[in-house]
Image (cartoon, rainbow, N blue to C red):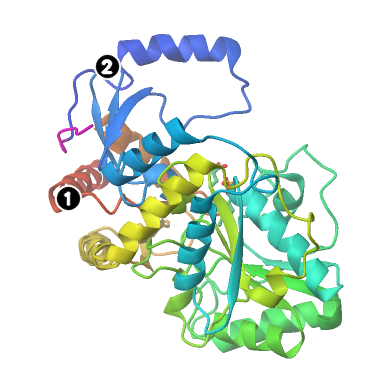
Amino acid sequence: MSLEQKRILATSIPGPISVQMQERRKQVVSAGVGTTLPVFIDRAHGAILKDVDGNQFIDMGSGIGVVTIGHTNEKVVAAVQEQVAKLTHTLFTVAPYEPYVRVAELITKHAPGNFAKKAAFFNSGAEAVENAVKIARKATGRTEIAVFDHAYHGRTNLTMSMNFKAHPYGTGFGPLAGSVHHTPMSYPFRDSEGLTGEEAATRAITYLEKRVGAGQLAAVFIEPIQGEGGFIVPAPGFLRTLSAWCRANGIVMVADEVQSGIARTGKWFASEWEEGFEPDLITVAKGIAGGMPLSGVVGRAEIMDAAHAGGLGGTFGGSPTAVAAGVAVLEQIEEGGWLERALEIGELLTSKLTALQAQYPIIGDVRGKGAMIAIEFVEAGTKTPNSKAVEELVKHCHSNGVLILNAGTYNNVIRFLPPLAITNELLEDALEVLAAGLAKL
Ligand code: PLZ
């Protein structure tokens, strides 16, 4: 299904049909399930979302990094259609099917690290993180888990305990899981001037050695570029120093690449941006299957094999349609062009956004890699977070047909993670809408 790659405002936002649907929704859908933009989407293609009133939005968020190679990518649609008519379920641990193995071949081939790798598949990012915890504990015989400030790992009990922000993820939902230790992150924009990656890592390591003890730790979990935290890119040397310390102390280093992985940053995995950083395990989800629910853990074969037979599984994990979509996504990335496109998008975004930063002192920082770029807003001339500006800008963009997402511990970040299928015209159009919003502020 193709759709003209053009922003169209057919009604006010939200349009009348969306308003009606929103009313129905309020009657029957839990208030705990929020909405960023209350328009109901009917269809999508490339980087365009079309709502039930005929409005067309430029998607600058890819459903939080999911439809990386574009909405309704033809090969993904065809693969799912073919699979759904052939076989939808056996449960892989009852009786296997080939595309699950094919996805494992592709992901183990392209995950960083010059060693034998294996993979296992699940449904959601949180489930992948939970399984990585189980595997690391089994492999080390240890219990404790370290995570970083500003991190996000999911909404299950264990993963919400691993999140930095209590609200909205954890408030009132406790008791939280134990044996999770929060550690200082490297946050170049907010760390003291000149703090190197090595120094920031030493700060975290000292903290863990004192608070937990290296010998107690099963795993250290880190997003190589933090997603929900606001696309925080740690200072160079941070990840490498941490992983060297993990290796020396028998701790499993886990990179949570649920948001940053699968071609998003111009490499298969964001971990590859830091030389010498070789995570033992990587969690993947979101962009791996173009919108079908698929997640996985991939990493060192001997660690992945530490889990006993029957210890990992789940009814729907790596279901036939999800893995068929995964094969179609990964084969297209392997064919080439997508990593380069992510880098081009990154250059275009960064140059336009740094020009806006020069003009508007409320933009404190422009950062990220490839098609994972964010701007952090402050009160002009300070580092005081400015969430009000973000709120206004998001509203402005939404009512003008551009779907942008906020992020950040202080809700003062706008993140850009468009589908890599986006055209330059659409990107430029979206940034012009943003610039008009800034001028209005
Ligand atoms: N790890 C790094 O970014 C999901 C959350 C959306 P699930 N981030 C988006 C929301 O409001 O729930 C995420 C992530 C990182 C893990 C997860 C969790 O992935 O597929 O949402 O469970």
Q: Earlier in the sequence, mark 1 or mark 2?
A: 2
The residue type indicated by label 1 comes to Thr
Q: Which residue is painted at 31% across and 58% down in the image?
A: 332
The residue stretch that appears in magenta:
1-6
The residue type indicated by label 2 comes to Asp
In the rendered image, the quadrant that contains the C terminus is top left
Residue 122 as seen in the image, left or right of residue 49: right
For residue 93, say whether it is visible: yes
Q: Is residue 228 above or below residue 402?
A: below
Q: Which residue is mark 2?
A: 53
- Say which quarter of the image contains residue 390: top left
Figure disc tally? 2
Q: Which residue is painted at 20% across and 62% down in the image?
A: 348
The crowding category of the residue bearing disc 1, from other C-alpha atoms within 10 Å (few below 14, some 14 to 19, many at least 20), is some
Q: Which residue is mark 1?
A: 423
For residue 285, say whether it is visible: no
Residue 33 as seen in the image, left or right of residue 290: right
In the rendered image, the quadrant that contains the N terminus is top left
Residue 413 location in percent, x, y? Answer: 44, 53
Q: Is residue 255 above or below residue 41?
A: below
Q: Which residue is painted at 62% across and 38% down in the image?
A: 90
